[in-house]
Structures are given as structure tokens and as C-alpha cells.
Image: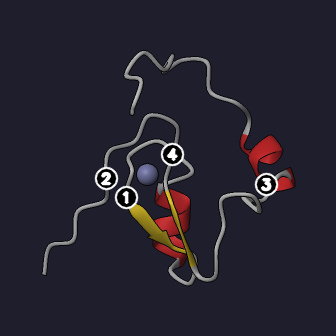
């Protein structure tokens, strides 16, 4: 269940996020993003960066 009341202007510093790798959520090469419920491939740097942004939407894949 997603809670949509996440404060947008109270973002934690990016440095803090880097210090805490998602080890608990991580399994193999992907994990489910707690913000948008999308599967994040840890081998894709663009996806990792995208899903680190607070309050983001699911990444769109347009071919
Ligand atoms: Zn996400």
C-alpha cells in the first residue's frame, strides 16, 4: 500500500542515501521500489538514480 502523503519538500540529503545501500530490500539484481512499486534493475544505473528521487513516478519505457 502506498501512502501518498509523503512530504515533497522534506527530502533527505543524497549523501545519507548513499551511506545506506538498500541491502534489506535488495535481492539479486533487482528490488521493488518502495515509492512507486516498480521493479528496479540494479544493473541499470539510470533506473537506480531515478528511483532514488523522493516522490518520483514509475519510470516509463518508451521504445
Ligand atoms: Zn520508484
Measure the C-alpha gap from mark 2 to mark 3: 21 Å
Point out which mark residue 58 bears: 2
Q: Which mark is residue 34?
A: 4
Q: CA distance from mark 1 to mark 4?
A: 8 Å
How far is the residue under mark 3 from the one under mark 1? 20 Å
Cβ of mark 4 under 8 Å from ligand 1: the answer is yes
Q: Is mark 3 within 8 Å of ligand 1?
A: no
User: Dividing the picture into quarters, in which one does residue 39 lie?
Assistant: bottom left
Label 2 near label 4: C-beta < 8 Å?
no
Label 4 element class: loop
| N-terminal label among 4 and 3 | 3
x and y percent of residue 1 in the render?
39, 33
Q: Which residue is mark 3?
A: 18
Q: Select label 2 or label 3 by which is in front.
A: 2
- Relative to residue 20, is residue 47 drawn left or right? left
Residue to which mark 1 is pinned: 38
What kind of element bears circle 1? loop
Q: Nearer the viewer, mark 3 or mark 1?
A: 1
Check disc 4: other Cα within 10 Å, few if <14, some if 14-19, many if 20+: few
> Residue 14 or 26: which is nearer the viewer?
26
Please name the residue shown 51% across and 45% down the image: 34
Amino acid at each position: 500500500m502506498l501512502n501518498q502523503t509523503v512530504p515533497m519538500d522534506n527530502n533527505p540529503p543524497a549523501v545519507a542515501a548513499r551511506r545506506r545501500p538498500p541491502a534489506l530490500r535488495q535481492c539479486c539484481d533487482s528490488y521493488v521500489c518502495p515509492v512507486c512499486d516498480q521493479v528496479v534493475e540494479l544493473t541499470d544505473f539510470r533506473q537506480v538514480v531515478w528511483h532514488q528521487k523522493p516522490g518520483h513516478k514509475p519510470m516509463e519505457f518508451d521504445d
